[in-house]
Image (cartoon, rainbow, N blue to C red):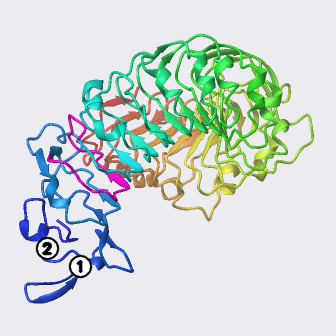
Amino acid sequence: MLGRRKNCSFETQRCIQLPKWDCSFYWGGEERDCCKWESVGCSELTKRVTKLSLNDTRPTKWTQYEFWDNNNGFFLESSLFHPFEELRELRLVRNFIEGFNGVLRLKKLQMLDLSFNRLTEIPSLRGMVSLKFLNFAVNNLKNLSTFQGFNGVLRLKKLQMLDLSSNGLTEIPSFRGMVSLKFLYLRNNDLKNWSSFQELTTLRGLEMLDLSYNEIAGEMPPSLGAMTSLKSLSFSGNELNGSFPEEGLCNLKNLQELDISRNSFKGSIPPCISNLTSLRLLKLSENNLSGTIPSDLLRLKSLEYLSLSLNHFEGSISLSLFANNSNLEVLELDSLNNELHVDTENTPWKPLFQLKVLRLSNCNLNEPSRSIPSFLLTQHDLRVVDLSYNAMVGELPTWLLKNNTRLEFLSLAQNLFTGQFMLPADSKDLDLFWLDVSKNDIQGPLPASIGQIFPNLWYLNMSGNSFQGNIPHSIGNMNKLHSLDLSSNNFTGELPEHLFMGCKELNMLKLSHNKLQGQLFPKKWNLTRLLGVAFR
């Protein structure tokens, strides 16, 4: 079991019962030093084992789909670990463990990782008085009763991190006595209400609380404001409603990360949110928020990640308010109602930041000129750009691809861009996987080398333009392409055979409303995954 060798399993006693625990021993007549094994860590002073990483040690193969369905679960003998008296870290990830026979008596153990197993009850950890980090993520823990039987945890006064994510918990467990707890993960469970939440407010040292992706409904309780030590808080992906929880959240002066996205909050953002001057991440996207965006919020120099997308904001804002922020990396302001007016040009400014993500779709951008934001000329590390549905004018800004060679997502759909689709001659093997320039007025031919330049494309939509000429042969080089839409253009000539042979992952193909000639399907084709076709 200690071995880095793939043939060592939990049932292989030879790998488990080593003759000496200081890792200087003879095995089969040949001296071996297990401290050099990749799965083992030892004290440099005593040479005794302090770390065991036994992830994926079971010889059984499994996949994402059969992990829970097979019959390979087993109960692990706790006594196997008792000789490791100096053990500080124990990782047993993905081993089909259903439970333990006996008690893990490891008094010096500080970290235990049992994630991705098949536990239905939390094992007894009596005597583990030094535990600081516990990970039970992705198991089959279902309810509070099994946790309350976990008398060991309730006495773990030194416990700092507990991860119970992705189980089946229906109630927030009791954490009384965990006076040192700093990090608590309860995401992706079946929590539905605020029962026992009041007990969480007694955790005065808690710095991170993650309750995302549960089914918690109703309004957020004002008692949340008592958790003043919080630095990171997430309720994303629940069913919370009511107005923005001003009374609770605005009291959390130490907050650095706040994520309440994907809920049903309504009303406006209160000005007091701008008093949280340590905020690095703020995600309020996918709610029903409305009103104006507080200008003081955009002036927070601490912000690195701001997502206000898919709400119903209105009024006008200027991105020049971010001028003095050198930390900003993610800015998402996609609008649902097309009543938010965003200006980037009227006040001269030069950004100090380098964005990685910019989403400004459906935003009434730069009226009345409707020009593309000029500050983008200074950005060279962009990975995601969405400027769709803004009716912007001018030539298609393909210079975004030249300036940002690591760009992965680019959508310029539903604008009024003109000109040709020009690409730098020396470009090749760009990382772009999503490109959408549909519903503009782009003319001329596609570059012959488009397939060499974008070999990693997964989605390509160029429909609703005025492209002309033949469909380039090199499109067949896009062997990762799943969706191709070239419909409603002026393409002519025959379809390249290489498209039907090389784009073997293609699910959707739209070529309708063009002037194509010849045979629709060539004699040779390899589109075995094709689900939808539109040629007329």
Residue under circle 2? Answer: 18
Give the dominant element type of the magenta stretch: helix, strand or loop: loop
Where's residue 509, x and y in %? Answer: 39, 35
Closest to the observer: 345 or 97?
Answer: 97
Left or right: 152 as drawn, with respect to 314: left
Up the image or down, 465 lies above or below 339; here it is: below
Up the image or down, 109 lies above or below 301; here it is: below
Q: Residue at x 26, y 57 (%)?
A: 55
Q: Secondary structure at mark 2?
A: loop
Q: How many marks?
A: 2
Where's residue 289, x and y in %? Answer: 65, 16
Do the residues bearing badges 2 and 1 touch, measured as CB atoms within 8 Å? yes
Where's residue 512, x and y in %? Answer: 44, 29
Q: Secondary structure at mark 1?
A: loop
Magenta span has 117?
Answer: yes
Q: Residue at x 41, y 19 (%)?
A: 215
Left or right: 180 as drawn, with respect to 21: right
Q: Badge 2 local density, few (<14 within 10 Å), some, or many (20+)?
A: some
User: On residue 473, which mark appears?
Assistant: none
Q: Quadrant of the C terminus?
A: top left
Residue type at the position of mark 2: Leu
Q: Which residues are magenta?
A: 101-123
